[in-house]
Amino acid sequence: MASQESLLSGEIRDVSLESRMEQAFLDYSMSVIVGRALPDVRDGLKPVQRRILYSMWESGLHPDRPYRKCASAVGEVMKTYHPHGDSSIYDALVRMAQDFATREP
């Protein structure tokens, strides 16, 4: 990124569109990988998994309580934390329920 001084001085530099797009895509992809795809070292959960568990806890979905449908948990997560779509929430919820899908229980 250009320095603050060069931005204020009005200096215009020619930059290859290809190299700039390559750098921007790399920056964005690394941000997505670190922010969403990699599990946190502290608890091993991805952000979407943490949101699901917290939302289930807040809405009273505990193991000793009566059964509720999966859609209620997904709807609560969508309403509170992730208003973009339900497919990633469903995928994460199903994956958490499958003990063979994770290395550590």
Image (cartoon, rainbow, N blue to C red):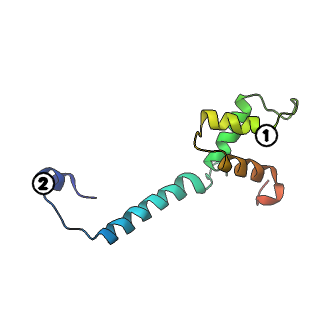
In the image, which disc is placed on residue 101?
Answer: none
As drawn, is 9 to the left or to the right of 4? left
Q: Residue at x 69, y 36 (%)?
A: 75
SS at circle 2? loop
Judging depth in this view, the residue of 57 and 19 nearest the camera is 19
In the image, which disc is placed on residue 10?
Answer: 2
From this view, report whether residue 15 is shown above or below residue 74.
below
As drawn, is 23 to the left or to the right of 90? left
Q: Position of residue 22 (x, y in %)?
A: 39, 68
Q: Residue at x 76, y 53 (%)?
A: 95
Q: Write down the quadrant of residue 73 in the picture.
A: top right
Judging depth in this view, the residue of 23 and 84 nearest the camera is 84
Task: Specify the amino acid type for callout 2.
Answer: Gly
Residues at marks 2 and 1 touching, judged by CB atoms closer than 8 Å: no
Residue where numbered disc 1 is placed: 70
- Mark 1 Cα within 10 Å, few/some/many (few <14, many 20+)? few
Separation of residues labelled 2 and 1 (CA atoms): 56 Å
Q: Residue at x 24, y 58 (%)?
A: 2
